[in-house]
Amino acid sequence: MQRTEGPRVVIDAQQINFIDYSGVEMLHQEARRLGQQGRVLVLRNARPQVIEELHKLEGPENCPILFED
């Protein structure tokens, strides 16, 4: 992800069924790094259970990751 240059880094998460704490933490860190550059990390088609796990770290209102269908 560090070599991408667009304003939005989009990950198609449709096939992700499970994410553990290390994956959650890595995505949060990457989203924050991108945010410092004026960019965003977007997970597209994420399953509800994956979104729920990503929200647990900082709460839905503070999650630095955007979600879209």
Image (tube, helix red, strand yellow):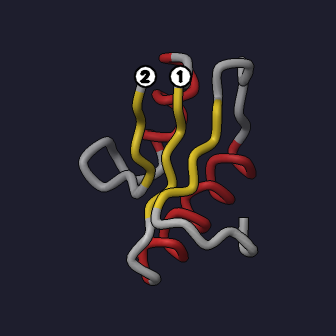
Instruction: Locate residue 20, reporting x and y percent.
Output: 73, 38
Q: Residue furthest front?
A: 6
For residue 32, the mark is none
- Residue closest to the eye, 33 or 18: 33
> How far apart, in angstroms, are the residues tagged by discs 2 and 1?
5 Å
Which residue is depicted at the point 72% across and 73% down? Answer: 2
Q: Is residue 32 left or right of residue 27?
A: left
Q: Earlier in the sequence, mark 2 or mark 1?
A: 1
Instruction: Locate residue 45, reporting x and y percent.
Output: 53, 22
Placement of the N terminus among the 4 image quadrants: bottom right
Q: Amino acid at mark 2?
A: Asp
Which residue is depicted at the point 63% across and 41% down? Answer: 11
Identify residue for label 1.
45
Q: How many marks?
A: 2
Marks 2 and 1 close (CB-CB < 8 Å)? yes
Identify residue for label 2.
69
Q: Is residue 3 left or right of residue 54?
A: right
Which residue is depicted at the point 38% across and 52% down? Answer: 63
Up-down relation of residue 32 to residue 62 (above or below): below
Which residue is depicted at the point 41% across and 36% down? Answer: 67
Of helix, strand and loop, which one carries label 1?
loop
Q: Residue furthest left?
A: 61
Of helix, strand and loop, which one carries label 2?
loop
Q: Is residue 13 left or right of residue 41?
A: right
Up-down relation of residue 31 to residue 67 (above or below): below
Answer few, some or many: residues within 10 Å of disc 2's Cα (few below 14, many 20 plus, some between 14 and 19): few
Up-down relation of residue 58 to residue 31 (above or below): above
Q: Amino acid at mark 1?
A: Asn
Instruction: Locate residue 43, reporting x and y percent.
Output: 53, 38
Answer few, some or many: residues within 10 Å of disc 1's Cα (few below 14, many 20 plus, some between 14 and 19): some
Q: Quadrant of residue 60?
A: top left
Q: Quadrant of residue 69?
A: top left
